[in-house]
Amino acid sequence: MPVSTGASAPSAAPSSASANVVAAGPAARADGPRSVAVFVGDPGRRRVALTFDAGADVGYAANILDTLARERAVASFGMTGVWAEENPALVRRMVAEGHQLINHTWDHRSFTGLSTGAAPMGRQQRWDELDRTEAAIQRIAGVSTLPYFRPPYGDLDPTVLADVGARGYTVTAMWTVDSLGWNGLAAPAIVERTLRLTQPGAILIFHVGAQSQDAAALPEIVRALRGQGYEFVTVGALVQA
């Protein structure tokens, strides 16, 4: 399974422009396990992981779940603790319908500050964000997000991989294809971009928020990829393959 632990997205992930992965900066801590940043799964199997980040408004989350149910496709949701607490019924529905939840921090603050201009968080601050989200999701839905983490904004450096790994998040779920729906792309353009860039083992990133047309593009994407022989699996299943 192709993975990356820093530096930049590998050539297998040309569309990960919104992932801010750097190798420079403070040295990673040596204690504890180190998380592995996964950008793409096994290129030898025609499987993809649909992932949706939920960290802003409720947006089209229900519509997305309706589409996934109708198309009998599973997905993974990068979930902030704040979003989970504001939308408990949707979180429980995700779990009941076989979808995976990934820890996306408490309130979507950048751990490195790269995308926001803030100072990098310290280890304890990062742990608090992870722990608070995990506790909320366990309380709401009775499931754990461990060992899967998705960094807000895709901001990542060696200290983040060390810190989240030491807390048990040994898989940092990045992505191969960014729909760019969050950046204002219209639904037809999202469909075209996603289908053009998808490859076996791809992790596709979408968003549930109302500012994105990802939900509108989703039915055509799922049907087209299935027509090309792709199977839809969770990030967990993709990593474990």
Image (tube, grey):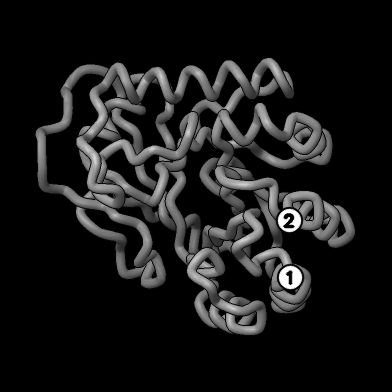
Question: Which residue is at a point 32% across and 47% down the rendered structure image?
Answer: 155
Residue nearest the observer in this picture, 129 or 24: 129
- Label for residue 216? 1
Residue nearest the observer in this picture, 141 or 9: 141
Kind of residue at badge 2: Tyr
Kind of residue at badge 1: Ala
For residue 109, side relative to residue 240 (left or right):
left
Mark 2 secondary-structure assignment: loop
Horizontal and vertical percent position of residue 154: 37, 50
Mark 1 secondary-structure assignment: helix
Residue that mark 2 sits on: 60
Q: Earlier in the sequence, mark 1 or mark 2?
A: 2
Residue density around tag 2, few if under 14, some if 14–19, many if 20 or more, within 10 Å: many
The mark total stands at 2
Horizontal and vertical percent position of residue 126: 34, 25
Residue density around tag 1, few if under 14, some if 14–19, many if 20 or more, within 10 Å: some
